[in-house]
Structure formats: structure tokens, C-alpha cells
Image: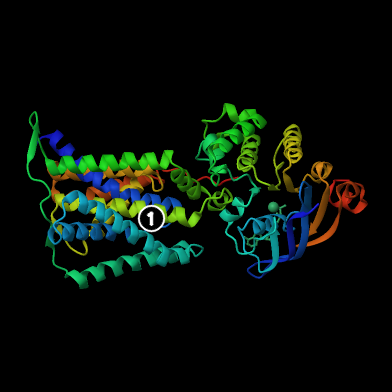
Amino acid sequence: MNFIQQLINGLSIGSVYALVALGYTMVYGIVKLINFAHGDIIMVGSYIVLFSMKSAGFPFWISILGAFTLCAILGVVIERVAYKPLRQAPRISALITAIGVSILIQNVFMLSFKPDPRPFPNVIDGNFGIGSINVSYTTALTIGISVLLMILLQLIVKKTKVGKAMRAVSEDEGAASLMGINVNRTISITFAIGSGLAAVGGALYSAAYPLVDPFMGAMFGLKAFVAAVIGGIGSIPGAILGGLIMGIAESMTKAYISSQLTDIIVFGILIVVLLVKPSGIMGKNVKEKV
Amino acid sequence: MSSLLSVNDLHVYYGAIHAIKGVSFEVNEGEIVSLIGANGAGKTTILHTISGLIKPTSGNFSFNGKKLNSMAADKIVKLGLAQVPEGRRIFSELTVQENLELGYYSVKDKEFIKNEYKHVLELFPRLKERRKQLAGTLSGGEQQMLAIGRALMSKPKMILMDEPSMGLAPILVKEIFSIIKACNNEGMTILVVEQNANMSLSISNRAYVLETGSIVMSDTAQSLLGNEDVKKAYLGG
Ligand SMILES: Nc1ncnc2c1ncn2[C@@H]1O[C@H](COP(=O)(O)OP(=O)(O)OP(=O)(O)O)[C@@H](O)[C@H]1O
Ligand SMILES: [Mg+2]
């Protein structure tokens, strides 16, 4: 297999990691919480798309919109019910709660839909060639949708009023509320966007690896979290960069070294990055405000 | 004159610490009032409570006839009561312009926003030159101007200022106070907390002296400036 081909595969899976990593990083930025239930939103998104296509017969794009919306709502509800009451509590309490939420979601899905993997419907067949390189439509679609969403997110965060409010709340909740910003609403919007992106990530992941089970979010979520940490947790460009690094490293390891070593390499990269720059590649060095 | 802000028998606890012990005072429309007191007296606590950042244990306070007691901080700003918080607390990762834009977050009227933006940049020409710069890279004095400019953007009826002169060179202190006075001349009511009591008394109508959570003195600024006890304790002489 040729190098460029592997690079494209890596970009494809990497952009899915990036979509999920964005949710980890945005939530961490605004409430300083590592939302362990975020990985399970991926799984919920995949199930929604699966049922929407198979049982209800909706096309892929409508199913993805549905998954985005429902998971956005789920993310907001989780924040309101489980995390908001703990906002002033030590972060370790919130972290343990997040792990609890994750276990709860996994088990609800296991009881409702059985633990056995279900096949994910075919989204689009076929390949197209650019010179000697062969790209599947699924790969192209994945990269296309991911890039589109990342640009959209960047525009929201940089240009809109809501985006400015999100950045302000991340930096100083109290000062933000003195500007008339509704902090609770801003946090909800952040969870909604992050969870929606995870749902899309889940659907795109399942389009490439078409088996869905209640625990699929755990390992995938963990890797996306690692991507966020490599890029610098709290940084949006960092999450995108981290996701792409992970995806490319994985696909190169599979192609040129051994597919059994992928996880070792991926976590190895994490360790090296943290040794060299503990705040991650694009992370801020935490400075005390004067 | 009618009282714009009134605080009645306010008590605030931090856990077991009784930080504010039954404080009452008022600020009338059009006044500049100083709140002076030593470090740890409770000045910031009072301002935070009025703005809704801290919930009091008991006591009533109202602004422009509306009870503020259980109102959220972002709602209080919308009533026209802004604050320049202690330590500036500008958003250092945002540009100067974005910081100012957040100042009118609660305002919808485009024309109004445009005028206020122009007005604030006229008051602080230095901010104008540095519009695109990240606020965290401004000098301390410029950051203080930004913090004040940001609070002015919504053209509030009243501003609470917590040590606006902290850490500034004497010439800048003068500049800041002349801007405060200018805002007051335009009709803004101001409650200012200061270590620099001399300066703040000199532009104030009245003042309150706070000692470990209680108000121990209140008078016109003029007579407090002449008061021997106040001179000893707060005016460095
Ligand atoms: N978050 C907190 N938790 C516990 N105690 C607090 C807290 N904030 C303030 N205090 C205490 O409340 C008292 C009043 O503090 P406050 O910050 O209101 O004082 P201040 O008059 O503004 O002082 P300064 O001039 O130093 O700014 C102090 O004894 C302080 O230690
Ligand atoms: Mg103070």
C-alpha cells in the first residue's frame, strides 16, 4: 500500500478522533471537567443512526442530523442533572460522577439492545481514483464532513456572540456574568455542541468500522481524549491537531509496523508529548492571573 | 434626590467567617460615594454581593426600586448596574475589541452600541490603537482602562468600582479619576472602593468607612478628609 493512501486513511480516522476530541476539550475548557461520559455519546450517536436508517428508513444525512440533535439534548441533560449540582464541588467528585454516568449509559444500552454487536448499514459504496491512489467514498465523506464541522465550529467560537461568551466563561466565570452573560446557558450550549459533534463522530466511525455495540465508545473515547491531551486540553486547534496526529500514527503503524502495536505507539506518543510539553502541543502554560 | 442603590442590614458569611456584619448604606442618583476600609474589611465582599456573585445570608438590597436579593448576576447587569471588579479581570485570551464587545453583551440596539463604542474609545485613545491586541498583552494601566471601558459599554446607570487605581503610577491614577469624574458629570452614579482614599474622597460627595465588616463612620467626603481619625488610619497622615 502506498504512503499517500495511508496518509489519507490516517486523516480520515484522525478527523473522527478530532471531532470527538473537540467535545472533551471544550467541556474541559469551560467547566474544568474531564467528561468521561463523552465517549459513550459516540455510541449513542451510532445507535441512533443505525435505528434511524435500518428501522425508520431515513437516509444517512437525515439520520446524522437526528443523532446530532438528540445527542446535543442528551449532553445538556447530563450536564444539568449530574454535573451542575457539583459545579462548586472538588473536581474529583465531578470526575467520579462522570465515570458513573458513563457506566450508566453503557448499561442502559446493554439492557435495552443486548451486548452483541450489530452490523451498521452501508452508507455509500465504491471508490474513486486520483492517479494511482484509491479513495473510498466513505473516507472522502468522513474527511469532508469533519472539515466542514471544524470550520463551522471555528467560526462559531471566533465570530459569534455565543462563541465570545464561551471563551469568556472559560477564562473567568464571575467576570463573564458581570458582563451580562448567562453562564448556565453558555455551559449548556458548550455541552450541546460537544455532544452533537461526538454523535457525528460516532456515525462516521461506524460507517468505516460497521459494528455497533454498547461499549464501542469506551476505547474510542479514551483515544479521542488522549488526542485532546496531546494537542493541549482546552485548546480547540490542539484537539484537531491531536486527533490528526493520532489517526495518522495509527494508520502508519498498522501499515508499516504491526497492527498489534498501534495502541502502544499511540499511548507512547502521549507519554513523549507530556514529557516534553506537559500542557500539550498547543496547550497554554498555566499562569497565575495577577 | 432619591436613593438609587440601597443596602439594608446585610450579613455575609464565608463558611463560619462572618465577613459582613449588618451593613446598611445608600447611594443617591448622581452621586459619587466612596467606601473606604483596610485590607480584609469586606469591601470586595459587599460589591460582589450587590452584583450577585455572592449570595448574602440575610439583608435586603435594591437598585432603582427593584429588589436584587435572589437575582442572578447577569440579570443585575441588565438593570443598568455594572461593576469594574477588583484585579481588573479582563479576558486575557480575547482581543481588546472583543473585551469591549462583551461589555455590551446584554444590549441589542446596534446604533446605541456603535455610539458607545466610539465614546469609550474617545475616553481611552490608547485602547483604540490596541484594538486587535490580545488583552493579556496590555500593560497593567491599559488593562485597567480596558476594565473600565468594558463596564461603560452598556452605558449603565451606576457603576461599582473596586480599587480602580490599584497598581497604577500616580499620573495614571489621576487620569483614571478624572475619567470617573467625567462619567459622573454625564450623569452616572458611582460607588468606588479605594485604598487611595485621598484621591477618591477628593472626587466623592459622601463616604462610608468600613471596619471588619461593619460601617463605623459615614459623612460627607469633605468632612472625612478633615477628620483626624480618618487621616491617621486611611490618609497616611
Ligand atoms: N472566598 C472566601 N472564603 C473565605 N473567606 C473569604 C473569602 N473571600 C473573602 N474572605 C474573607 O472575608 C474578609 C473580607 O474580604 P474582602 O475581600 O471583602 O476584603 P476587602 O475589604 O476587599 O480587602 P482588600 O482591600 O484587601 O481588597 C476577609 O477577612 C477575607 O479573608
Ligand atoms: Mg478587595
Q: Is residue A141 left or right of residue A186?
A: left
When asked about the image quadrant of residue B149, the answer is: top right
Front-lying residue, B65 or A51:
B65
Work out whether residue A281 can be spotted: no
Q: Residue at x 73, y 38 (%)?
A: B186
Position of residue B13 measured from the top left corner of the image (x, y, whole percent): 66, 67
Residue at 34%, 52% (x, y): give it: A194
Image quarter (top left, top right, bottom left or bottom right) of the N terminus of chain A: top left
Q: Residue furthest top?
A: B129
Relative side of A62 to B169, left or right: left
On the image, the x and y values in percent for residue A188 come to 42, 56
Q: Quadrant location of ligand 1?
A: bottom right
Q: Is residue A266 left or right of residue B184?
A: left
Q: Which residue is mark 1?
A: A191
Callout 1: helix, strand or loop? Answer: helix
Q: Chain of mark 1?
A: A
Q: Is mark 1 within 8 Å of ligand 1?
A: no
Residue furthest to the bottom in view is A111
Q: Quadrant of residue B21?
A: bottom right
Q: Quadrant of residue B96?
A: top right
Query: Which residue lies at the image location 73% right of the left edge and 47% below the top edge?
Result: B190
Q: Position of residue A41 (x, y in %)?
A: 28, 59
User: Is the residue B216 above or below the residue B203 in the image?
Assistant: below
Report the quarter where the C terminus of chain A lies. top right
The amino acid type, in three-letter code, at marker 1 is: Phe
Q: In front here: A129 or B236?
A: A129
Disc 1 packing (10 Å; few <14; some 14–19; many ≥20): many
